[in-house]
Image (tube, rainbow, N blue to C red):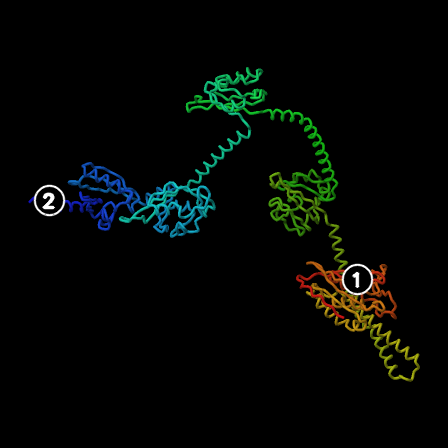
């Protein structure tokens, strides 16, 4: 009957246990655990754990065993435990249950994630939840702000992600395995108050963080499966601490650098031991300087004043300062500045005195030197003042003597000064200009009569942006209402800080220049018209001159053919002379026509390679090369800009002359080379011919100038004149270096083309 009653009692207890809403565990004397539904939902079924304590975090096992053992002895107890999947700890009440058993009642605090998260955000505490692979599962707003990342950027990132930029507190790279999250997962222990730095990409700076990493377990698991990290941004606190440390270091360095003697005294003003600085400097022993014994180290003449000043400061609890001489350990007296201040308690009473003695011997010497140099300085200041006055007078003379009009403007556009030339040009007195808004007075309309808005005025723009401006054509208005064409430069003025304070305008009346430009334009138009008339005249003259020449030549040929053999030798020679003269005259007319037309067309220049030109020159002078046994070589890697046909004519003429004017018995040798830069190509044509005397170096470039008779060397004496005109048409030059019997070198410069090929030396015999 008793067993039946016990069975019913156990059944009722089990039903009661399951009916409880809170998690409850019944631990039997044998260690067997019964869990109600709420406990199993929280901790998991008991079957998956080897012992009932395995349902809890490993760190809690000793506390739980001790509490259950106490309950077995009839002693109830309470403890708080962190549970898996719970943020806040649970209150566990352990009470006796039967003979040797214990009942564990877990009271779980209400967790309101929204409230907790808001509270953490308001406190500026970041919270990050990571799984066992350290992947970030969630983070609050404060964590996002601290790390400088969005939730999308943060979610899924691990602690070993290379995108993290972290440094230890010592400034070394923070290895992933040493970071608090990894340590919490590896050890199962909380990592608290770990200080390190992380780079915030949103702010673009390094932030100091204090991080606590808390491992979290799922019931029955031996290893944590989550880590909750609490992040606190302590950057400002760290910076404040650093500033305090820097300030302390500076103060310590200052004391050392100034060689100050630091001492302390009791509230009543008496010296107390130890005073290491005082003892080291004065040589007094501890017994000698205690109380008022330190006065013995003061110069006898200074003791009374020192004691009076010190007594007054102690009585008033005010600053003590005096200047006296102290006997150094070697017996020498050193002038020193003494200062002391009271250090007070919160109630205002003096706790102690802290004082310093500073060696001022160097200061006194410097003061003496300063007094000695003051006279010299004052003299230099007076001299400098005179120099500045002279410079000011010279500047004033220069301003008044300047032929250009000059006026200065304030930042508001009002005249601060104006020189007499400006007043004369504008028709106003200097007094009328000073203080006037010059835009409204002299610059209000364009020459066309249209209004000139101030915001478009170059002078006004310089006052705004500080840019120097040069204007070649604008209009100022004279006092009598007429327009004055001007050019001007406006330059900003600045103060020592670089801020714009105004502007200076220098202008010139360009009425005469405009008339000269108009006259020049008229002259150019007349010149163009004259050139056109000359070109038409040359064409007409060429036609009219060549027509009778052709008639004469035709009749000479007709006489020669029809009366061949019927005339004597003299008549035949006359006819030959006649035909030769006609041919020479026709050649001369063609050369003149060509000379007059050079440079009068608008055909564009093109890139011409000198190597290609020299190939054609070689072809043109091949007969001369073969007839004289001469040799032509060239090294012309450059390209020039020009008219290919004209440049070919020029080079053919120079090479042809070199082959023509050679020394008897010595075959001609002609060398053509080029050198250049990005703007100009220099071509030299060198020969070993008869040379040219220096007095003829310019004459040979004049039209119809011949240095030799036609019987010696054929030609019209116009080739070099045409050559120089071709060079000048291309913007280049042509000159000669030579002496009689020593050969000649012609120097030709031409505009360079953008690119030049590599050198290719050539030789032709």
Place residue 557 in its image quadrant: bottom right
Lateral position of residue 222 relative to residue 678, left or right: left
Place residue 563 in its image quadrant: bottom right
- Quarter of the image with the C terminus in it: bottom right
Lateral position of residue 717 relative to residue 187, left or right: right
Q: Are marks 2 and 1 in contact (CB under 8 Å)?
A: no
For mark 1, what is the residue? 745
Lateral position of residue 575 relative to residue 266, left or right: right
Going 43% across and 51% down the picture, which residue do you hit? 162
The vertical placement of 644 against 80, above or below, is below
Q: Residues within 10 Å of mark 2 (few under 14, many from 20)?
A: few
Q: Secondary structure at mark 2?
A: helix
Q: Residues within 10 Å of mark 1 (few under 14, many from 20)?
A: many
Which numbered tag is attached to residue 340?
none
Q: Position of residue 593 (x, y in %)?
A: 79, 69
The vertical placement of 695 against 68, above or below, is below
The vertical placement of 30 against 723, above or below, is above
Q: Nearer the viewer, residue 596 or 749?
A: 749
Q: Secondary structure at mark 1?
A: strand
Q: Position of residue 357 (x, y in %)?
A: 54, 24
Place residue 691 in its image quadrant: bottom right
Q: Position of residue 111 (x, y in %)?
A: 29, 44
Q: Nearer the viewer, residue 318 or 587?
A: 318
Please report whichever mark, 2 or 1, sits nearer to the chain's N-terminal start. 2
Which residue is at the far left? 1
For mark 2, what is the residue? 6
What separation in Å lies between label 2 and label 1 (alpha carbons)?
138 Å
């Amino acid at each position: 009957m008793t067993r039946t009653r016990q069975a019913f009692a156990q059944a009722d207890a089990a039903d009661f246990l399951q009916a409880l809403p809170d998690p409850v565990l019944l631990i039997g004397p044998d260690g067997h655990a019964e869990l109600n539904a709420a406990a199993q939902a929280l901790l998991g079924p008991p079957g998956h754990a080897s012992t009932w304590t395995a349902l809890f975090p490993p760190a809690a096992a000793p506390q739980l065993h001790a509490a259950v053992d106490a309950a077995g002895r009839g002693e109830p107890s309470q403890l708080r435990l962190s549970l898996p999947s719970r943020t806040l700890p649970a209150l566990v009440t352990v009470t006796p249950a039967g003979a040797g058993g214990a009942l564990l009642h877990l009271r779980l605090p209400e967790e309101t994630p929204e409230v907790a998260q808001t509270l953490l955000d308001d406190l500026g505490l970041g919270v990050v939840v990571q799984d066992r692979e350290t992947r970030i599962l969630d983070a609050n707003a404060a964590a996002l702000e601290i790390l400088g990342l969005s939730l999308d950027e943060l979610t899924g990132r691990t602690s070993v992600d290379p995108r993290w930029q972290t440094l230890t507190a010592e400034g070394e790279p923070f290895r992933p395995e040493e970071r608090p999250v990894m340590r919490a997962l590896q050890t199962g222990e909380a990592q608290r108050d770990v200080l390190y730095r992380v780079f915030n990409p949103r702010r673009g700076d390094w932030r100091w963080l204090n991080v606590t990493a808390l491992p979290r377990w799922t019931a029955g698991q031996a290893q944590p499966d989550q880590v909750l990290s609490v992040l606190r941004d302590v950057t400002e606190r760290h910076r404040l601490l650093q500033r305090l440390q820097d300030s302390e270091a500076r103060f310590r360095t200052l004391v050392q650098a100034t060689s100050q003697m630091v001492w302390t005294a009791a509230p009543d003003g008496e010296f107390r031991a130890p005073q290491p600085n005082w003892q080291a400097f004065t040589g007094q022993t501890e017994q000698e300087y205690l109380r008022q014994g330190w006065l013995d180290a003061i110069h006898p003449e200074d003791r009374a004043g020192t004691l009076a000043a010190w007594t007054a400061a102690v009585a008033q609890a005010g600053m003590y300062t005096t200047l006296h001489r102290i006997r150094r350990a070697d017996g020498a007296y050193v002038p020193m500045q003494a200062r002391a201040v009271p250090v007070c308690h919160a109630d205002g009473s003096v706790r102690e005195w802290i004082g310093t003695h500073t060696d001022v011997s160097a200061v006194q010497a410097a003061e003496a030197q300063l007094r000695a140099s003051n006279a010299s300085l004052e003299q230099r200041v007076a001299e400098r003042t005179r120099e500045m006055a002279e410079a000011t007078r010279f500047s004033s003379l220069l301003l008044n003597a300047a032929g250009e009009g000059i006026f200065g403007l304030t930042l508001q556009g009002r005249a601060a000064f104006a020189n007499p030339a400006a007043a004369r040009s504008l028709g106003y007195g200097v007094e009328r200009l000073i203080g006037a808004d010059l835009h409204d007075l002299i610059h209000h309309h364009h020459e066309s009569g249209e209004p000139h808005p101030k915001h478009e005025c170059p002078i006004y723009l310089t006052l705004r942006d500080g840019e120097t401006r040069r204007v070649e054509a604008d209009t100022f208005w004279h006092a009598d209402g007429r327009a004055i064409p001007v050019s001007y430069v406006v330059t900003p003025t600045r103060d020592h800080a670089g801020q714009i304070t105004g502007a200076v305008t220098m202008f010139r009346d360009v009425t005469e220049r405009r008339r000269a430009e108009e006259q020049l334009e008229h002259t150019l138009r007349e010149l163009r018209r004259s050139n056109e008339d000359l070109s038409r005249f040359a064409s007409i003259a060429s036609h009219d001159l060549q027509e009778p020449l052709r008639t004469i030549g035709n009749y000479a040929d007709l006489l020669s053919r029809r009366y061949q053999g019927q005339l004597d030798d003299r008549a035949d020679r006359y006819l030959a002379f006649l035909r030769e003269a006609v041919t020479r005259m026709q050649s001369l007319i063609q050369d003149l026509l060509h000379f007059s037309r050079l440079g009068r067309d608008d055909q564009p220049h093109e890139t011409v390679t000198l190597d290609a030109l020299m190939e054609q020159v070689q072809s043109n002078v091949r007969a001369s090369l073969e007839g004289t046994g001469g040799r032509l070589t060239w090294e012309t890697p450059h390209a020039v800009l020009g008219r290919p046909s004209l440049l070919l004519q020029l080079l053919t003429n120079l090479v042809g002359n070199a082959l023509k004017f050679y020394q008897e018995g010595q075959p001609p040798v002609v060398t053509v080379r080029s050198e250049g830069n990005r703007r100009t190509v220099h071509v030299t044509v060198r020969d070993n011919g008869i040379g040219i005397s220096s007095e003829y170096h310019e004459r040979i470039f004049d039209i119809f100038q011949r240095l030799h008779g036609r019987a010696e060397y054929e030609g019209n004496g116009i080739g070099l004149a045409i050559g120089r005109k071709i060079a000048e048409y291309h913007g280049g030059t042509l000159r000669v270096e030579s002496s009689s019997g020593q050969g000649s070198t012609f120097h030709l410069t031409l505009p360079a083309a953008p690119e030049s090929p590599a050198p290719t030396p050539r030789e032709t015999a």
